[in-house]
Image (tube, rainbow, N blue to C red):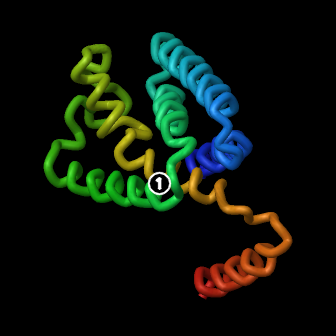
Amino acid sequence: LFVVLAGIGVALMTSKARNSMNGELIRQSRNSLYKRAAFLFIAGVLLLLMGWSADILHYYAVFMLVAAVLITVSDNKILGLFSMILVASQLFLVMFDYTKGWNLSFKDYTGFWTIEGFIRNLLFNGFHPIFPWLSFFLIGMWIGRKRWLNKENRSKVLLYSLSGTVVFES
């Protein structure tokens, strides 16, 4: 939920730049996301150094970097990337050892501070690895790009919400 909400927030934060396609606004939005990514990465690494092994901030840093690149990408390309990452994630689960680096309690990660261990943890088998969690972030970006609160869309949102409620509660 929080990764989807982060994607929605980034889409809303960059909507003015994306809608105007103003080069300066796009540059400012990207720089803002780069700064947020740097802050999240540094904060996450500091938490890890202090012994908090369940840090997720450094994953969010990567999500922000990806968002900076995708500000001007079409919705269809975001959905295509979402699908590719989701399929790749499932293939990785079959092809690779998900438990590599973890002890039996999943509290300690051996080799985390090596380049190989850090990248494996970041991309594949950490707490919120890029594969598949970037898919949730991309869906959030896609949702955030929809104009859900416009008057012409309110009836659709109500219909979808009611339909979803009935289906899921049934």
- Residue at 63%, 80% (x, y): give it: 164
- Up the image or down, 86 lies above or below 43; here it is below
Q: Which residue is mark 1?
A: 78
- Residue at 51%, 11% (x, y): give it: 50
- Residue at 63%, 33% (x, y): give it: 23
Residue 119 position within the rendered picture, expressed as x and y whole percent measured from the top left: 29, 26
Spot the residue most to the right.
151
Q: Amino acid at mark 1?
A: Ile
Q: Is residue 161 visible?
A: yes
Residue 102 position within the rendered picture, expressed as x and y whole percent measured from the top left: 27, 32
- Residue at 73%, 62% (x, y): give it: 147
Q: Is residue 56 visible?
A: no
Q: Nearer the viewer, residue 21 or 163?
A: 21
Residue 84 position within the rendered picture, expressed as x and y whole percent measured from the top left: 32, 56
- Up the image or down, 66 lies above or below 95; here it is above
Q: Nearer the viewer, residue 37 or 145?
A: 145
